[in-house]
């Protein structure tokens, strides 16, 4: 068995290098390093740890609660722990969860687990992910995943949900498009599950197909439109800027924060550059909302006058009198699609409670904005948002104090 | 600001208690240590008579004239009242155990009383001194010249106040606190409508003057601004 032992040793060395995982592999026989690496990379593409790892917690040992419009769901422990993780699952169970939303013992999963997107993943990649999951250190952590109220706590109801919202895979190539575009479409629609946050939802919580990636509100954040639309989407971004944003957390002019910060730190900053470029190509090709850019609110409007004073005294030192920010550190507001979105929940939120940008290996600073809610009234927040949405060439609807009040109430 | 209690814990325990920071800088939502705004006219510490006496004294230090409103109109007594109710008044951040020796002039007050105790005793001593001089006629009813004369004597250490109160030291305390009230941020109760800042042309709690750095010999165009903002932030109509 000397030969096998050597190979095994070499395999472990490679696994150690790639994954820095110390627990013994549980798969039988020799595990190919490339399979393991592919499995690890699938976990990056799918951002498993984004939901299944608590902030500062053990890898995949269960995540922070997710507030949905239907109630609270807690992402379960998916380490190989036998009692509290998925140690008893078989590969078949795992395929069922990833491709059909049906877990071990025929138990239906809630689509907070993005199986409608993972369904596009080839079985080869799902299997590799399964193999890699066996190398994650088992952690004993019992999670009560289903905190939903009746009737949503009835998992069988998800059969009906699937009838309405679920189109099984696999991914269908568009032969008229480039390989790069198709790769991007696969990553965005499939494992990246971008629409889970960025697409508006119907009453059942499924994606609204004809408003694909046009922006949506969830968990108190408005995930902006990420189509190629020139006003509210990525039309004003170059592919290089999108790649830089996903790889580092900043495009130079924009800085990621909120839930996207977590996506970048756990997932996109670890993706291959070619994959990020493919994502950029695909997103910029999407037509988007094509919303007609309104006429900006006049500069002498009382809201703009008051908002301009609030901006000058609270914001201009960092974001600049001309709204140009500071490259890689402070987001530019002039020309920013993010500040011209349909809903202003994110904007009000970051002014009230502050926010910290993403930290990646290539841009580790994680610049932060201080909370200003203690000294700005709802009307002052509304007016300064109206001001930044309608200055320097920006144009978007006025913000009402009432909507700021709603955001503030939810934050407390 | 490191509280004295936590500082003591750090210095007495053998192991370090500092947090280790790696990766991104630590950050928390809502992280701020905002001041508690003092409402106009609030009076928690002084009795009515004390407030009346201190107002009369403060209004000789900063009288109403062509430069500004008076100290009391600017809220200086409200400011001092609020300060005496807080950590300043109780000297909670100062070493307050003995020995108590009369220090050098440069060392300031070295006695055992907190500022709150000094005001209580000091105002009582001045009121008693005034009562002895003009029975039934309070300091506030004196003419401005009579008031100035007594204050000048206090400042020059020429008055012996009852109960061993050091009149000169107490006058200096009031002088310092009135000025603080006149020029501190309005959020603390004094400097009402930024009267003190408008008088000297101070632009307030602003932190970015880059657009004006190159504009030499031109007046700064904006009204001063408190920590809590100013009237420009409020929507006019619409």
Image (cartoon, rainbow, N blue to C red):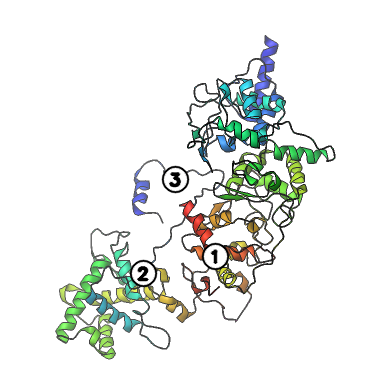
Marks 1 and 2, how far apart at CA: 23 Å
Q: Which residue is mark 3?
A: B18
Q: Which residue is mark 2?
A: B39
Q: Is residue A341 above or below residue B161?
A: above
Q: Nearer the viewer, residue A249 or B233?
A: B233
Same chain for the residues under marks 1 and 2 in the image: no
Marks 3 and 2, how far apart at CA: 38 Å
**Chain holding disc 2:** B
At mark 2, the secondary structure is: loop
Bounds of the magenta segment: B215-220
Query: Residue at point 60% right, 23% down?
Result: A134
Q: Is residue B73 above or below residue A130?
A: below
Which comes before the other along the chain, label 3 or label 2? Answer: 3
> Badge 1: few (under 14), some or many (20 or more) residues near its Cα, within 10 Å?
many
| Residue A266 drawn at (x, y percent) | 61, 39
Marks 1 and 3, how far apart at CA: 32 Å
Q: Is residue A70 above or below residue A82?
A: below
Q: Is residue A128 above or below residue A148?
A: above
**Chain holding disc 3:** B
Front of the two marks 3 and 2: 2
In this rendering, position of residue A82 left or right of residue B142: right
> Badge 3: few (under 14), some or many (20 or more) residues near its Cα, within 10 Å?
few
Q: Residue furthest right?
A: A176
Main SS of the magenta part reads loop
Q: Which residue is mark 1?
A: A314
> Badge 2: few (under 14), some or many (20 or more) residues near its Cα, within 10 Å?
few
Front of the two marks 1 and 3: 1
| Residue A291 drawn at (x, y percent) | 71, 57
Instruction: Report which quarter residue B164 is drawn in.
Output: bottom left
At mark 3, the secondary structure is: loop
In this rendering, position of residue B96 left or right of residue B197: left
């Amino acid at each position: 068995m000397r030969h096998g032992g050597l190979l095994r040793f070499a395999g472990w060395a490679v696994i150690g290098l790639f994954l820095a995982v110390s627990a013994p592999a549980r798969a039988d026989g020799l595990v190919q390093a490339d399979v393991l690496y592919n499995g690890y990379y699938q976990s990056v593409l799918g951002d498993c740890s984004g939901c299944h790892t608590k902030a500062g917690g053990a890898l995949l040992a269960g995540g922070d609660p997710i507030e949905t419009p239907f109630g609270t769901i807690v992402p379960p422990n998916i380490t190989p722990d036998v009692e509290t993780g998925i140690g008893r699952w078989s590969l078949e169970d795992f395929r069922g969860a990833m491709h059909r939303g049906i877990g071990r013992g025929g138990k239906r999963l809630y689509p907070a687990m993005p199986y409608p997107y993972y369904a596009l993943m080839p079985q080869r990649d799902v299997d590799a992910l399964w193999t890699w999951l066996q190398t994650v250190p088992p952690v004993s952590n019992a999670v009560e995943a289903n905190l939903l109220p009746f009737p949503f706590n009835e998992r069988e109801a998800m059969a009906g949900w699937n009838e309405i919202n679920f189109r099984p895979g696999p991914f269908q190539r568009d032969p008229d498009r480039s390989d790069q575009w198709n790769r991007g479409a696969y990553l965005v629609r499939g494992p990246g599950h971008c629409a889970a946050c960025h697409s508006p939802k119907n009453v059942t919580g499924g994606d609204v197909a004809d408003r694909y990636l046009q922006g949506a509100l969830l968990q108190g954040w408005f995930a902006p439109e990420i189509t190629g639309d020139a006003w509210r989407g990525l039309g004003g971004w170059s592919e290089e800027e999108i790649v830089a944003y996903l790889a580092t957390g900043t495009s130079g002019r924009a800085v990621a924060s909120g839930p996207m910060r977590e996506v970048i730190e756990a997932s996109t900053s670890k993706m291959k550059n070619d994959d990020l470029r493919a994502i950029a190509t695909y997103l910029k090709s999407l037509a988007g909302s094509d919303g007609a850019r309104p006429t900006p609110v006049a500069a002498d409007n009382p809201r703009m006058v008051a908002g301009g004073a609030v901006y000058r005294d609270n914001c201009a030192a960092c974001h600049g009198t001309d709204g140009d920010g500071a490259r890689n550190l402070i987001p530019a507001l002039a020309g920013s699609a993010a500040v011209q979105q349909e809903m202003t929940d994110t904007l009000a939120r970051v002014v009230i409670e502050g926010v910290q940008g993403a930290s990646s290996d290539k841009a580790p600073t994680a610049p932060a904005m201080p909370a200003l809610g203690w000294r700005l009234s709802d009307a002052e927040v509304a007016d300064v948002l109206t001001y930044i949405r309608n200055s320097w060439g920006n144009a978007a609807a006025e913000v009402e104090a009432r909507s700021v009040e709603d955001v503030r109430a939810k934050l407390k | 600001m490191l509280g004295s209690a936590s500082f003591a814990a750090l210095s007495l325990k053998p192991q370090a208690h500092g947090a280790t920071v790696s990766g991104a800088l630590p950050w928390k939502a809502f992280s701020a240590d905002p001041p508690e705004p003092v409402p106009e006219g609030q009076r928690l510490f002084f009795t009515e008579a004390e407030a009346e006496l201190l107002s009369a004294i403060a209004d000789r230090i900063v009288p109403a004239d062509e430069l500004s409103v008076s100290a009391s109109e600017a809220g200086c007594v409200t400011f001092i009242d609020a300060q005496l109710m807080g950590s300043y008044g109780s000297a909670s951040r100062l070493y307050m155990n003995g020995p108590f020796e009369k220090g050098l002039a440069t060392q300031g007050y070295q006695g055992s009383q907190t500022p709150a105790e000094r005001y209580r005793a000091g105002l009582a001593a001045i009121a008693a001194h005034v009562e002895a001089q003009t029975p039934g006629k309070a300091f506030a009813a004196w003419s401005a010249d009579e008031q100035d004369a007594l204050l000048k004597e206090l400042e020059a250490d020429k008055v012996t106040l009852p109960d061993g109160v050091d009149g000169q030291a107490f006058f200096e305390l009031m002088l310092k606190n009135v000025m603080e009230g006149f020029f501190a941020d309005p959020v603390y109760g004094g400097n009402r409508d930024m009267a003190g800042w408008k008088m000297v042309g101070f632009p307030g709690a602003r932190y970015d003057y880059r657009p004006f750095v190159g504009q030499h010999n031109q007046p700064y165009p904006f009204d001063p601004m408190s920590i809590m903002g100013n009237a420009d932030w409020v929507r006019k109509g619409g």
